[in-house]
Amino acid sequence: MQQKKPLNVEIGRRIQQSREKAGMTQEQLSEAIGRSTQFLSTVERGVAGPSLETVVQLCRVLNVTADWLILGKSAAPTSSTIAAKLSHLTGEQLIQVDAMTDRLLVLLEQKR
């Protein structure tokens, strides 16, 4: 049996997480990147690592960065990504978020 490399296991786990977050099955993702379902399963389990070409295809299809897939580093949020998270809140909830944001900003200023 082939020894799993820790980096391949981590990358495979992040690919699986990203696929599930995107609401895709292994079959759907495999088709989108032009690879077999068996190959994707092997990569997600960490038995093998993806090629650079496959990483690029995965990033495009899953809308994630290579930093995330390879290193586990998430991109810093932008004001628009934060706004999108808040767009479904009610008026009362937005008032609460606004108050919490004000308090958080005060705390952050104190730590400077």
Image (cartoon, rainbow, N blue to C red):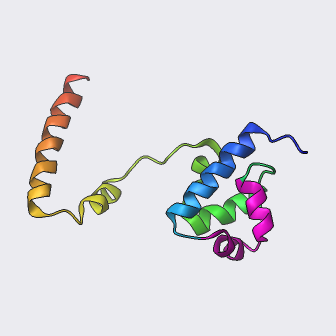
Residue 58: quadrant of the picture: bottom right
Q: Position of residue 28 (x, y in %)?
A: 64, 75
Name the chief secondary structure element in magenta.
helix
107 sits left or right of 21 in the view = left
Which residue reaches farthest right?
Answer: 1
Is 46 drawn above or below residue 36 in the view shown? above
Would you say residue 36 sits in the magenta stretch?
yes
Point out the stretch of residues depicted in magenta: 25-44
- Please tell me which residue is depicted at 72% across the width and 40% down the height of the picture: 7
Image coordinates for residue 101, horizontal then vertical, percent: 17, 43
Q: Residue at x 61, y 61 (%)?
A: 59
Provide residue 2's location: percent of width, then percent of height: 89, 44
Queried whether the magenta region covers residue 22, the answer comes back as no
> Percent position (x, y) of residue 73?
54, 43
Quadrant of the image occupied by residue 71: top right
Give the residue furthest to the front: 1
Q: Is residue 75 left or right of residue 41?
A: left
Nearer the observer, 70 or 18 = 18
Q: Is residue 57 left or right of residue 48?
A: left
